[in-house]
């Protein structure tokens, strides 16, 4: 392998000659073989790093700190990164020491070396375009890195919301398809009162719709950035007008309403926005898991369970039991939810670990949030396409369970009173009798009145009371 020699404050190393990254990236690769997930796994994060570097170059140019020519090549190199041409040049592990310095330097080196190529120089010829002196000009990892994180999270949230909306539409569609299927509702896993399967699925849709507002609301917190804070928020090594100019360019490049934090010393170690957004991801995960618990119960059987719905058969369910098919899609979504809940706890600990003017635990924090978003997006896609859209109802079975249920006695409360209805329920349960037969046997109601009161369709929405 051909190499080129680069140096940093620790000495010299041989870097692959064709690599756009440099010595600091190479050291990070050697030091941080931790989770095995590289920066390249999250293109939106790399895109955001390129946007930050582009905005910074333009701001530095306006301030007279970068020549027009060098700015042009830095912007061009950043645009190529945004176009996806160099994702493979970001090999640093997502979890790293150094508060994200390795990530920031990976971006600085790739953009510097590509700019050098565009200028007609060799990679590593940093006299003409230096990763620190030019690409990182007016910045620190401590403002460039969290700003890129926040831009990436806003954009990833948009993608997550689109997948969530598709899942919600699938539940709405099933709600309409099943609006005529009468079934028993349950509380504490016991028979309660009738409802329709359509009402049940429509409730799932509405339940998830609430999360769109929560996710978007918390993602708005990421609009506040600390560009120009440099190391600790005092703005050392940046000019007075830099913050205003770089934020203006970020707004134009990202098409986002980016705003500058009111107090950069406060904003630099603050990780409150990550805590809030992670909690919204956890809330979504909990709701998805509850829904999948329901789907597993409703499809249990087929002979000895609820057997109200059929999930699409995805694979054989046993290596020993012939004919067994498992609810594998809801099961995998459950497991994703557990991981998201665990990631939220990691975010909590990482946010709490901030000390003085910096929180050095941001790498594990951002890795946890991005992993949760990626897994939730994939899980909702799978749940939608491989489960919800293919669910069918066992309509007659659902109706027979309603007619044979003790729970329908609740519909007689307004007419017979609670005491009489409770006595009927107890007797029916103890003697394996039907509520219907007992009411007629005891002459509590005429057959016509009883038939009217016990129409399943009457029991799924409010009705005018009927008296004897």
Image (cartoon, helix red, strand yellow):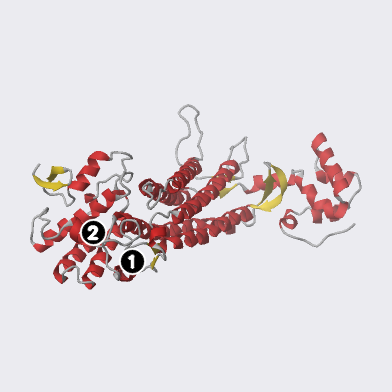
Indicate which disc, 1 or 2, sits on the residue closer to the N terminus.
2
From the viewer's perspective, tell me whether residue 295 is left or right of residue 363.
right
Q: Which of the two residues, 125 or 378, is positioned nearer the viewer here?
A: 125
Image quadrant holding the N terminus, namely top left
324, above or below 119, in the image: above
* Helix, strand or loop under label 2: loop
- In front of the other: 119 or 237: 237
Label 1 Cα neighbours within 10 Å, binned few <14 / some 14-19 / many ≥20? some
Find residue 332 and report its horizontal and vertical position in percent: 47, 42
Q: Residues within 10 Å of mark 2 (few under 14, many from 20)?
A: many
Judged from the image, the secondary structure of the residue bearing numbered disc 1 is helix
Residue 315 image point, x, y percent: 44, 38
The image shows residue 381 at horizontal and vertical percentages of 43, 52
Query: Residue at coordinates 10% horizontally, 46% vertically from top-left?
Result: 5
Residue, disc 1 = 254
- Image coordinates for residue 447, horizontal then vertical, percent: 86, 52
What residue lies at 65% left-to-right and 44% top-to-bottom?
A: 397
Visible residue check, residue 306: yes
- For label 2, the residue is 136
Q: Quadrant of the C terminus?
A: bottom right
Q: CA distance from mark 1 to mark 2?
A: 19 Å
Q: Residue at x 74, y 43 (%)?
A: 405
**Residue 173 in sight from this viewpoint:** no
């Amino acid at each position: 392998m051909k190499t080129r020699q680069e140096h940093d404050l620790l000495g010299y190393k041989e870097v692959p000659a064709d690599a756009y990254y440099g010595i600091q990236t190479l050291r990070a690769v050697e030091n941080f073989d931790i989770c095995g997930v590289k920066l390249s796994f999250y293109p939106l994060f790399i895109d955001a790093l390129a946007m930050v570097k582009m905005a910074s170059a333009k701001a530095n140019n306006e301030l007279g700190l970068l020549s027009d020519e060098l700015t042009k090549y830095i912007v061009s190199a950043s645009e190529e990164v945004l176009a996806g041409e160099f994702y493979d040049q970001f090999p640093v592990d997502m979890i790293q020491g150094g508060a994200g310095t390795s990530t920031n330097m990976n971006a600085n080196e790739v953009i510097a070396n590509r700019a050098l190529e565009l200028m007609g120089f060799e990679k590593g010829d940093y006299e003409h375009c230096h990763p620190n002196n030019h690409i990182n000009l007016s910045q620190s990892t401590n403002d460039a890195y969290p700003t890129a994180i926040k831009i990436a999270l806003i954009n990833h949230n948009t993608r997550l919301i689109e997948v969530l909306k598709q899942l919600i539409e699938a539940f709405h569609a099933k709600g309409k398809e099943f609006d005529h299927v009468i079934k028993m509702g349950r509380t504490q896993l016991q028979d309660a009162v009738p409802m329709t399967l359509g009402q049940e699925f429509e409730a799932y849709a509405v339940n998830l719709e609430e999360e769109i507002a929560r996710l978007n609301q918390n993602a708005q917190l990421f609009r506040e950035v600390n560009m120009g804070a440099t190391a600790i928020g005092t703005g050392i090594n940046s000019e007075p007008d830099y913050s205003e100019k770089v934020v203006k360019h970020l707004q134009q490049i990202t098409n986002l309403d980016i705003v500058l934090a009111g107090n950069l010393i406060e904003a630099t170690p603050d990780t409150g926005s990550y805590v809030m957004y992670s909690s919204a991801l956890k809330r979504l995960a909990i709701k998805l898991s509850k829904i999948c618990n329901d789907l597993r119960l409703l499809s249990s059987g087929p002979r000895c369970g609820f057997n109200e719905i059929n999930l699409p058969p995805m694979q054989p369910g046993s290596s020993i039991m012939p004919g067994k098919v498992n609810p594998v899609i809801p099961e995998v979504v459950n497991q994703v939810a557990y991981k998201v809940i665990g990631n939220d706890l990691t975010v909590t600990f990482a946010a709490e670990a901030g000390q003085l003017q910096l929180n050095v635990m941001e790498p594990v924090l951002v890795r946890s949030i991005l992993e949760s978003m990626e897994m939730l997006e994939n899980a909702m896609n799978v749940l939608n396409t491989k489960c919800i859209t293919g669910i069918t109802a066992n309509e007659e079975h659902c109706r027979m369970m309603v007619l044979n249920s003790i729970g329908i006695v609740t519909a007689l409360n307004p007419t017979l009173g609670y005491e009489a209805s409770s006595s009927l329920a107890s007797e029916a349960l103890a003697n394996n009798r039907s509520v219907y037969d007992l009411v007629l046997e005891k002459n509590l109601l005429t057959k016509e009145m009883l038939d009217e009161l016990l129409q399943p369709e009457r029991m799924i929405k409010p009705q005018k009371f009927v008296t004897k």
